[in-house]
Amino acid sequence: MEYDYVIVGAGSAGCVLANRLSADSGVSVALVEAGGQDDKLEIRMPAGFSKLFKTDYDWNYSTAKQAELSGRELYWPRGRVIGGSSSLNAQMWVRGHRRDYDQWGIPGWTYDDVLPYFTRAEHRVGSNQGGVYGTSGPQVISELRSPNVTTAAFLQACQELGYQRLPELNGASNEGYSPTPVTQNRGRRWSAADAYLRPALKRPNLTVITGATVDRVVFDGTRAIGIEHGGGAQVRARREVILSAGAIGSPYLLMRSGVGAADELRDAGVEIVHELPEVGKNLQDHLSSGVFVECRQPVTLVKAESIVQLFRYLVLRSGMLTTNVGEAVAFIRTSQEEPAPDIELIYAPGPFIDHGLTPPTGHGLTVGVILLQPESRGRVGLNGRDVVIDPAYLSKEADVKRMVAGLKAAKQVFATKAMKQWAGPPMAPYSNPESDEELAQWVRDRAETLYHPVGTCRMGTDADSVVDPSLKVRGVEGLRVVDVSIMPTLNRGHTHAPAIMIGEKASDLIAKGGVA
């Protein structure tokens, strides 16, 4: 089994690469995925994503105990299926802010450099004021078909609080509030597999291998020549091996293959191919807290699982089951000293508690609070063959202060006239903390991931970076990393859109650069 390109991981970036590289009929491409097919109803049904958590479609990771989060181990879902996390996510298409890409300081990766790759990917259906979105790409982006009645009240509350209404969320600045653009096509999830992989499957030069958990990259000296899976089976690469396994999988595979910090590799019993100490470092994630209140009227997503709603979805592709849960957002600065938004407020017209795994006890409303630019840095490491995930949440005091300020802003939303008709008293487990100390403790006791890990194969121009600006792994040949692990810092948005952009840009880099 030998191909020109072997791509590891059929997630957002991997699906893009499989499509774009196989468009050249003169090359052969293999896409290797640990999971199986994305044919489950809950993948297609937008509101069903939490039903996929802790199933065979999920890597079901847990972090190390977090000292600043009351010693808790946090659950981290990641997609283990065709489409990767784009088959499990909340379908929010949020590029971020111009500053996010300019602050990287990397030639070829400024906002103006990457913008054409966002628009090349996008197929905007519906509003497109100012031509912000692309309209001819494969990734369908639409408005929600059946937004909840309380979502309009949230948007009115944002106006009441003096926030700016955004004509389109994904312009150069995202400071303000907006309904959420979603990766849906006629009320159905439109994953990276739908957008990119399925249209390419008919090509004879593209092979998709599922159910194949990759154990390591195979090297000849310091040149990557393929991958090994299933305890010994190999897939060889004539030109390049491309890791698109995400912010956990890509550094893990580099380390398991002998590329990483020498001491850590020796401790794990891995033979060193090339010492690259920064592999797995620089881990960042969006930490999420929130305010929960009871809803005064029985109109929330608690009713989504009724027979009526199932009929509406299956027959009309409308109703509550088309929701992405996070129906509207506001990106705000908690102080004038912030150069751009530091907190995101996500509105859910239902009680989204414990990743949706805890059944609601009644009708409730949620304003989530997301720390957009964490100063804390963690790591992905090895413990023998096992992966260690330590995001080191709140290890920087500035992160705590911003989260507290964000919770205060969320409380203000529910105190507005616009929300008076809907927002009732606090809903368990939320206890309505008031002081800064109480709010900080609420974060420590209950905060969770927003599913956006990045940074563990940091791109840079410096010798310490894991990949260079063409995404080649430093010190070895024939190996690149193409996924959000290459992002030096998090975006003030969500990570699915940048993952697609990175895949689009990488496909050009590979086509123009030939052999890595």
Image (cartoon, rainbow, N blue to C red):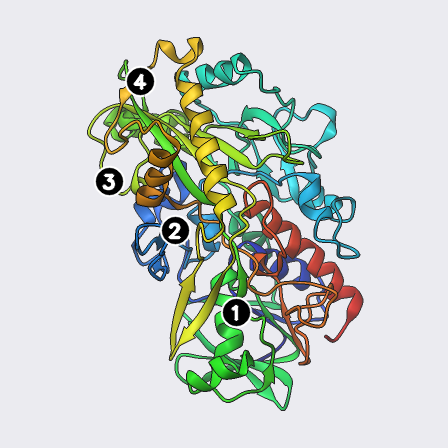
What's the CA distance linking mark 3 and mark 1? 32 Å
- The residue tagged 4 is 299
Q: Position of residue 61 (x, y in %)?
A: 36, 60
> What SS does tag 2 mark?
loop
The quarter of the picture where the C terminus appears is: bottom right
Q: Position of residue 331 (x, y in %)?
A: 56, 31
Which residue does the image show at 68% across and 80% down from the upper left?
A: 475
What's the CA distance linking mark 4 and mark 2? 30 Å
The quarter of the picture where the N terminus appears is: bottom right
Image position of 510 (left or right of 317): right
The dot on residue 374 is: none
Disc 4 packing (10 Å; few <14; some 14–19; many ≥20): some
The amino acid type found where label 1 is placed reads Pro
- Name the foreground residue: 236 vs 369: 369
What's the CA distance linking mark 3 and mark 4? 19 Å
Mark 4 vs mark 2: in front: 4
